[in-house]
Image (cartoon, rainbow, N blue to C red):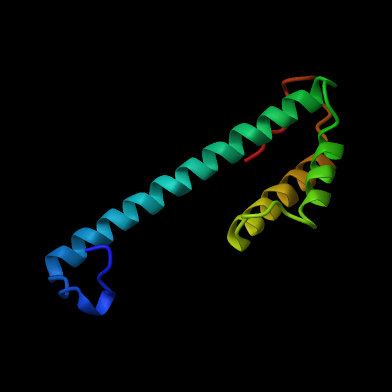
Amino acid sequence: MKDEQPDDLPPLTQEETEKWIGEVEDKAWMANAEVFACRFLLGNLLSELNDRGLMDATAFVSRLQAGLTSPPQGLSQQQKFGLEDLLRDLQLHFAHPSDGEAGSGRVFH
């Protein structure tokens, strides 16, 4: 079955196609939810550490952005775009610091 080319496979029935599309949609929805959760947790962790003076999040994000000029081997173009997008959002978030005390800053999302 692994060696079969797509042309060698029998066509899917409408029911099989609908089931397959539903499974793909479910996986896409879950991936999107996981990405949001990871961005939310990471961004807010960096915000908290930055607000408490435990790290310079702006410098950290800048170092990561500089590292993307020569990304690690095996990083796909799509993954690179995702990292660039996250780092740009973090950079914008930290460019406008909150005036509150530690733990009361703006929420990253």
Q: What residue sits 59% from the left and 60% below the top?
A: 78
Task: Using the rendered view, name the quadrant where residue 82 is placed.
Answer: bottom right
Task: Using the rendered view, name the quadrant where residue 69 is placed.
Answer: bottom right
Task: Using the rendered view, name the quadrant where residue 62 is placed.
Answer: top right
On the image, the x and y values in percent for residue 23 come to 27, 54
On the image, the x and y values in percent for residue 91 come to 79, 46
Residue 8 appears in the picture as rendered = yes
On the image, the x and y values in percent for residue 43 come to 67, 36
| Left or right of 38 on screen, residue 33 | left
**Outermost residue, front direction?**
3
Which quadrant would the N terminus be assigned to in this image? bottom left
Residue 80, above or below 98: below
Which quadrant would the C terminus be assigned to in this image? top right
Along the line of sight, the residue nearer the viewer: 64 or 108: 64
| Left or right of 3 on screen, residue 92 | right
**Outermost residue, bottom direction?**
7
On the image, the x and y values in percent for residue 19 come to 19, 59
Q: What residue sits 28% from the left and 74% below the top?
A: 5
Residue 52, above or below 95: above
